[in-house]
Image (cartoon, rainbow, N blue to C red):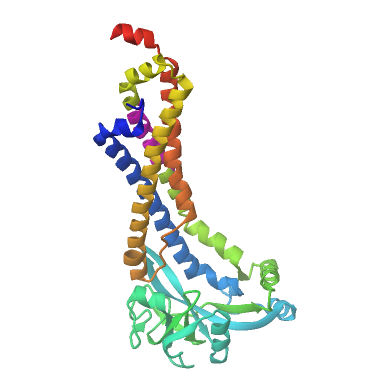
Amino acid sequence: MKPLSFLTYYKGNKKSFISSVISISIVIAFLYAANTFIKSIEVSFYKLYLSEYNTYARIKTFGGENSIPKNIMNTVKKDGNVEKIIPFKWYALDYNIMGISADSEVLALNNNDINYFLNKQNITVLSGRLPFQGKNEIAVDSLVAKNRDLHIGDSVGTMINKFDSIYGKYKVVGILKGENMISIAPINDAAYYENNTSILPKGGVIIFPKKNKINKVNKLVNSLPNDTILPETMNTMSAELKRSLDFSKILDIITILTIFLMVITVGSSKYIQFLNRKEELGILNAIGYTKIQILKNVILEVFLVNFISYILGLIIGIILSYIDKYYIFQSCGALGVILDVKAFIVCSYIPLFTTLFTIIPVNSMINKLDPINMIEKS
């Protein structure tokens, strides 16, 4: 027999081996799937709210103002880093992902600015056409269309969905595909009425920088007085999104609690297993194995169980993430993530800490071994 052999022991204790592997691998799979699930929500909201700011900055009207103050507009126009300024009106379509209600942007633009905007944002017309000036028409992003189950010929707006922020009724005439989730409508300065109150859509200007000057333009926009305008750059919008939708803290709490419970459960279970094998450890010590050699064998055994559990858990976690991506996220017009570096790292904490907190008490037990006393008692 091989003393304290991993294979020899678990051949006779298959249930113990299987239960150890399954319990650890299930937790690893859960942690992996939880991390990729949250990551999927984050990348979906990045595309929904932030990706557009890679190529431009914006200034929106603030409070009761309906236009950008002239002094601010003059400052922007005179800046040498600015390539083009496009006026816009802001609307939104209701977009729901995993029970989280959000706004999918609709930018109303002048007809002569639409092609320039689409080109800069790498947006193409997937099907249909672009909306015509003076018509209540809209070209909807493909993911938003999937989320809302919209097709060419359907309609959106407050008359169709009370959660939309585009007043009236707009006919879908085109489906767009690009690096963001912006929908396009023709600009309209007319006021809308709700409960006998006139409502003017919020607007502003989109500032496109010259080549490689986006950081300069962002700095310019952030330096403008913000008492009468809302500056929107990648930094300001990232901070705003993080304040309103910060899942990382929740995920950190789940991870810490899971690791803590797993370490206590598995660590205690493994310690009891080695405690039941105390005689075997004592015999090894009696026949000449040093306590360091015994501890090395224990570490190897625990490591192998945890390694097998880690690999199995990752495989299950990746399968669950695949199901999440294609059957939960993509089916509702969102983005899914299957492979994530952070998820791999977080999952490695489970075998790492269970190994550590198994070895510490077992090492203490090994140091207290008294083979002569054990033989006398037997």
72 w.r.t. 22: above or below: below
How many marks do you count on the picture? 0
Tell me if residue 150 is in the magenta stretch: no
Task: Determine if the magenta segment contains residue 270.
Answer: yes
- Estimate the x, y position of residue 161 in percent, counting from the top left: 34, 76
Vertical side of 281 occupied by 151: above or below: below
Q: What stretch is highlighted in magenta?
A: 256-271
- Left or right of residue 77: residue 5: left
Which quadrant holds the N terminus? top left
Position in image of residue 77 (x %, y %): 71, 81
The residue most toward the top is 376
Query: Which residue is at 59% across, 66% downward?
Result: 234
Quarter residue 360 falls in: top left
Q: Is residue 137 visible?
A: yes
Quadrant for the C terminus in the image: top left
Can the viewer see residue 99 in this picture? no
Looking at the image, which is closer to me, 251 or 362?
362
The residue at the point 37 percent across, 16 percent down is 282
Return the residue nearer the eye: 54 or 110: 54
Residue pictured at 38% horizontal, 46% vertical: 28
Judging depth in this view, the residue of 100 and 35 nearest the camera is 35
Quarter of image, res 356: top left
143 in relation to 342, above or below: below
What secondary structure is the stretch in magenta mostly built from?
Answer: helix
Q: Front-most of 372 and 259?
A: 372
- Is residue 231 toward the left or the right of residue 153 in the image? right
| Percent of width and height locating residue 48 | 47, 70
